Image (cartoon, rainbow, N blue to C red):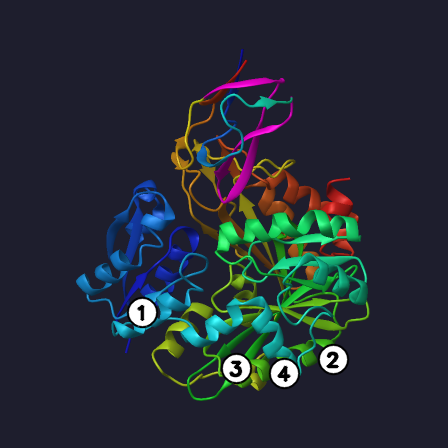
Amino acid sequence: MINKVLIANRGEIAARIIRTCKKLGIQTVAIYSEADHKAPYVTMADQNFLVGPPRVNESYLNVERIIAVAKETNACAIHPGYGFLSESEAFANRCVEEGLTFIGPTGSVMKQMGSKIAARNAMKKIGIPVVPGTDDAIATIDEGLKIAKQIGYPIMLKASAGGGGIGMQVVNSDEELLKAFEGNSKRAQTFFGDGSMFMEKKIENARHIEIQILADHHGNAIHLYERECSIQRRNQKVIEEAPSRFISESTRQRMGEAAVKAVKALKYTNAGTIEFLVDESENYYFLEMNTRIQVEHPITEEITGIDIVEQQLHIAAGKELAIEQMDLRIDGHAIEARIYAEDPVTFFPSPGHISNFELPEGVNVRNEVAVTADYDVTPFYDPMIGKLIVKGSNREEAITLLEEALSNYKIEGIKTNIPMLQEVVKHEQFRKGNTTTAFVENFYQK
Amino acid sequence: MQEVKASMAGNVWKIVVSVGEQVEEGQDIVILESMKMEIPIAAEASGTVKELKVAEGDFVNDEDVLAVIE
């Protein structure tokens, strides 16, 4: 039984988790940094605790303080949300040692999936297709050049410990690889404490399609279909939709089955996402696994009617999944647009004071927000300040709803990416469903 | 004399020049980190770095002077 949860996160996801806990009659404890004392999520929780100064190392990554607050408040479980400690094997293990339930998978499976190289090799062993590339970290640039010759350009150079697009670069020639290798490795070392690099063939005109999975501690696993997240800027997602318009019913089925097979083989538990790249001929290749709740989980909730946070709590409490694969159907089409505090053209962040804030409303419009009116967006955290989710009976209807909702989204005082979102949504190629990962590059930043 | 100013609030992630160093117009002087993104701040004119007003790890506000170039 979980009766009190500490949320080791901030912003919209903290608010989102608190909402489901309230629905289930579970008590909540929020933590916040000095920069977030006015954040809306803080007062939504039954209890709230200041954990440190604005910088993440002293607050949201301050494991000792977070564990101490959990003990002090008698919380029996910790929900890590996404980002911060959500994929920290050490934190998950520490929770267990302290007798706290970590709402997520085990530390060992997180470790395995956290290294892109290890994850890739594990998937290959299970029989899941992976992008042609290196099976080990590249030790020297000479070795890199040799492998590049075998794979063929263009190549994606990636940091094994990377995330959020950092340390990742497309290289088209030996010259570019020479130029990029050392710098990216150094950067990965600075950001992630691990400079190992690997290479994968760049799949041209690829789509980013991911499968949401749920798995319990009794060997049951299901998938909740796919999300297509091809509209990205700086290798970060901007617009996501479910289901994908591109893949056929048989590809959908095969990808779902592959994801479930992988999860069972890994003995994975709780919610997770397997990301794939899909090429023009609908061949899919494993990209990475996210061992936590995703930012874009609401679109899956909208088309399946399942509350993913509720399932996470249910699974973490040791209960058996109450849903079977055959019970699931896709209902309608959902789209999420991420609202970022950033310049819509340069994509540079735009911290500052929000003077006016008004959200679009409607039956099929859902808002997840981190901010409010008369509120300071600080430079310390991710620029995402909200998510706008719409659901239509089909994609066309969802697009119309999204267009309308975006025009009614009012934020004054800071720059946001709303003008960019509006341009994408009205673009002929987006409407046609011609959404590859190069969309922003090809059609927006002409 | 030219003042190199922060274009937005953030943390000083890296200082890439030292005092006395000759810099060119457009050369990065300081890299800020704001909202998890690196923001390079470049010199607007060539010259010699006379003074660095910040240290790595410092928090700066929009328009704060980061360095002086002569």
Horizontally, is A42 left or right of A195 in the view? left
Instruction: State which region is magenta.
Output: B25-51
Q: Earlier in the sequence, mark 2 or mark 1?
A: 1
Kindly identify the amino acid type of the residue bearing the numbered disc 2: Ser
Q: Chain of mark 1?
A: A
- For marks 4 and 2 on the same chain, the one whose residue lies earlier in the sequence: 4
> How dense is the environment of label 1, judged by Cα within 10 Å: few (below 14), some, or many (20 and up)?
some
Q: Secondary structure at mark 4?
A: helix
Instruction: Determine which of the numbered discs, if any, sits on residue A94 in the image.
Output: 1
Q: Reading the chain from its start, which is encountered first: label 3 or label 1?
A: 1
**Left or right: where B4 falls relative to A225:** left
Q: Earlier in the sequence, mark 1 or mark 4?
A: 1
Tell me the distance, in whole angstroms, between the alpha carbons under discs 2 and 3: 24 Å
**Which mark is on residue A125?**
4
Q: How many numbered marks does the figure carry?
A: 4
**Residue that protrudes farthest toward the left in the picture:** A72
Amino acid on which the number 1 mark rests in the picture: Arg
Please tell me the numbered disc located at residue A250: 2
Can residue B66 be seen at all in this image of the molecule? yes
3 or 4: mark nearer the eye:
4
Q: Residue A417: x percent and y percent?
A: 59, 40
Q: Position of residue A265 (x, y in %)?
A: 55, 85
Q: Earlier in the sequence, mark 3 or mark 4?
A: 4
Q: Compare marks 2 and 3 and give the one earlier in the sequence.
A: 2
Q: Nearer the viewer, residue A404 or A341?
A: A341
Q: Which mark is residue A300?
A: none
What's the amino acid at mark 3? Leu
Label 4: chain letter: A
In terms of secondary structure, what is the magenta stretch mainly?
Answer: strand
